Structures are given as structure tokens and as C-alpha cells.
Image (cartoon, rainbow, N blue to C red):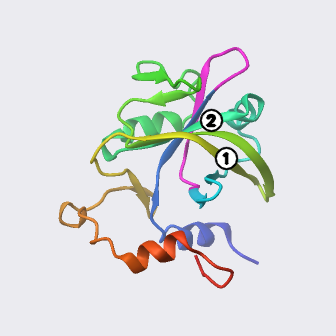
Amino acid sequence: MIDGREFRNVLGQFCTGITVITTVDPAGEPIGFACQSFAALSLDPPLVLFCPTKGSRSWAAIEAAGRFCVNVLAEEQQSTCATFGSRAEDKFAGLAWHSSPGGVPVLEGSLATIECTVDSVVDGGDHYIVIGRVQAMSEAGDGRPLLFYRGQYTGVAPDKSTPAPWRSDLDSFLTNTTLDTWL
């Protein structure tokens, strides 16, 4: 039997980025939640995934709307993350945001936004695995991401923020996967 606390501690060794997934509810009000279980899934077609808990009110609104926006948080957005990770009634109060041309809330200051439609949903234990088809996306700048590691916020060290030089073999690996690719 796997102990829940040990499971969380072990998985806490894996650093994750933090996003806020947003949509509008059936009444047209903005809604969202902090999410660190987000990942790219496919280049062709362009798909991403995130994993909300089955009891999430935000997930219910996303499912009803059929569309959502992934807001990739910058390191200075810790308070935004805390708000969207809470059970506050109006998580958008006092927050700078705008509605995208696709009609989903976009948080100001995010490093990137990815607008999607719900493509499919798979059972994942006490969560759902939501696969989104990318409809639009944008990059906001050169900031550093807000990260979560060992149960707390962290960031990229200033001397480590420069990406490694791009290599053609890595580009080939990432864009030309085969059945035996481990990625």
C-alpha cells in the first residue's frame, strides 16, 4: 500500500510550473483555478492536458463552456496563484485581466497563454485528465516562470535562466517522435 504523505513527498521532488486555468461560467462570469498538473501532449494536432480534481467547481464550468485558457504564471505572480488556489468566491476581484477574442479570461502578467477547446476527458482516479485542442496562443515576454518544488514556490536561479543553445538533434528529437521514442 502506498502511503499518501510519502507519495506527495516523493512526487514533490519533481519541479512543476504553475498555471491558472480560466473560463467563463454559464452566467458569463470569469472562473478559474491554480493548476500545476499541466503539460504539452502533442504537436500534431496541437494538444495540451491538465488534471482537475473531480469535485472542482472550476472544472464543472470549463466542461460546460467547452473552452479554457491556460495562463502560465510568472515568478512574481505568487499572490495570483494563492488566490486561484483558494476557495475565494471572486478570484478575479482586483486582478488585471481581459477577455480574449475567443471569450476566455486572460490574466495580465502571465508569461504565456494557450486558448483551447475541450477535446476529450479521461478518468484519472480522483482527477480527470482533460485534453485540450489548442486554438490560439501567445507569449508575453522574457520573464521567469513561477515554479513549485517540495511543497513551496521556487524560481529559476538568475545564473541558470539562459537556456542551453538549441541543437538540431534535440529539435529533431522533439518534433519527430517515433513509436520507440521515450518522450
Task: Please identify the quadrant where the N terminus is shown.
Answer: bottom right
| Residue at figure coordinates x 71%, y 49% from the top left | 130
Cα separation between marks 2 and 1: 8 Å
Give percent across and percent down for residue 98. 46, 21
Task: Please identify the quadrant where the C terminus is shown.
Answer: bottom right
Q: Which mark is residue 68?
A: 2
Per the image, the residue denoted by label 1 is: 132
In-image side of 58 versus 165 (left or right):
right
Q: As displayed, is residue 119 above or below residue 15?
A: above
> What kind of element bears circle 2?
strand
In-image side of 31 versus 139 (left or right):
right
The quadrant holding residue 9 is: bottom right
Please say if the residues under marks 2 and 1 sit with CB atoms less than 8 Å apart: yes
Residue 26 in magenta stretch: yes
Viewer-closest of 60 and 164: 164
Q: As displayed, is residue 93 above or below residue 157?
A: above
Viewer-closest of 126 and 103: 103
Furthest-left residue in view? 159
In-image side of 21 versus 107 (left or right):
right
Q: How many marks?
A: 2
Q: As displayed, is residue 172 above or below residue 80?
A: below
Residue 96 in magenta stretch: no
| Residue at figure coordinates x 57%, y 27% from the top left | 104
Give percent across and percent down for residue 136. 54, 38
Give percent across and percent down for residue 163. 28, 66
| Residue at figure coordinates x 69%, y 22% from the top left | 25
The part of the chain drawn in magenta is 24-38
The quadrant holding residue 150 is: bottom left
- Disc 1 marks which amino acid? Gly
- Disc 2 marks which amino acid? Phe
